[in-house]
Image (tube, helix red, strand yellow):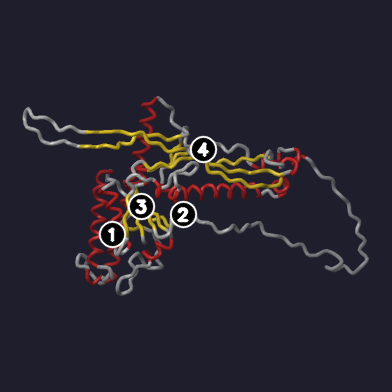
Amino acid sequence: MNLKELNEKIPAKQKALHDIYEEAGTDLDMSKIKSLSGDSTAKVEALKALNQELADLVAERKSLVEIQKQREQMDEETKAGMAPIKNDPAPLGKSLGAMIMESKAAKSHGTAANLDVDLKTLFQSSAGWDPEALRIGRVIEYPVRRLMVADYLPIIPTQQDTIRFMLETTFTNNAAEAAAGGAAGEAALALTETSDEVEKIAVFIPVTEEQLEDVPAAEAYLNNRLGYMVKARLDSQILNGDGSTPNLKGTLNIGGSLQTQAKGADPTPDAIYKAFDAIRVTGFAEPSVLFTHPNDWQTIRLLRTADGIYIFGNPQEPGRDIIWGVPVCSSTAVVENTMIAGDYTMFSALYLKRGITIEMSNGYSDYFVKGKFAVKATLRCAVVHYRTSAFCTITGV
């Protein structure tokens, strides 16, 4: 199917699924559902099949939208006479190990020492050698959350320090039928320049030159952990950043016409559906993801019918987390008791000025005389929400 067909079919499928849940009522009594045949088990299986069909349609739409955006970007570059921007992140330069091994300290060699040992006692552990104790090479890292939020935003390289675009702030459509010789209705349009700043996320750690020389794995370990720290902060900023420099502007703080749907007395799935509908009716967009805290998603995932059948699949069944056909991203980067939905595929973007860069210097403080280095990881980017009404929070869940 093409994009237009998918945009028409997805809301219809979601409406059908919502109507079935309405039949079941708040207690999820499968016997009340008349639009499906069979016993409770058969009806639950039919619901899961419909939910999976919705998920497949949403995934197909997302792929087509990404292809469309890539084509539009190439068209804009061609019109502007600009060479396409490469998608490769900024080069990291020499690795930590390479820089250390080129230093004078790394090239110097110590002298061997000979030790004369007079072993006149019984050759046993207390007077001879203790058994050599070898440590395995594995490092058990501190438990940290999985990085997922940024995966749902299109990533666009940029050479600018500010992302500027024109936002249509007035749209008055006075088109109407006119008699012969009659006046046409006068329309009104207004554009406002809008911008989001490119900001920097950075972190550093001190390390001795001996540590880098003596432990080959230290280079990869520091690259991995510092890079993770930067990306974890980015995940949080995409949703929660307050937009006050040097913070990025996260979804919760985009202002404008950001929509809100209170749960109130509704079952949580109903409140989510109403938020999706608000995005369609007011934002004229299609939700591409629902961000939720794991504790809030747990309540939905464990929903059961009145006779004990799990609505979102039996515990032994593997599968994607989806609701109303929309993917669910369960992450502790999301504020608990508040879910966030929106059309991130069409109306948001992560602009990368410079990918994650690892740098090292002994010029910080007294590091040179003490043989220490400051290892720093940085990222420069901007988070843009083009149409604020294409996003909605669900509160009180």
Left or right of residue 128: residue 193: left
Q: Secondary structure at mark 3?
A: strand
Which is nearer the N-term, disc 2 or disc 3? Answer: 2
Residue that label 1 marks: 50
Residue type pointed to by label 1? Leu
Q: CA distance from mark 1 to mark 3?
A: 21 Å
Q: Residue furthest bottom?
A: 307
Instruction: Please name which of the two marks, 1 or 2, marks the residue nearer to the observer.
Output: 2
Which is nearer the N-term, disc 1 or disc 4? Answer: 1
Residue that label 2 marks: 333
Residue that label 4 marks: 354
Residue type pointed to by label 4? Arg
The answer to whether the residue labelled 1 contacts the one labelled 4, judged by CB atoms less than 8 Å apart, is no
Q: Which residue shows up at 71% across the image and 37% down it?
A: 102
- Give the answer, above or below, for where 291 lies relative to 376: below
Q: Nearer the viewer, residue 207 or 30?
A: 207
Which is nearer the N-term, disc 4 or disc 3? Answer: 3
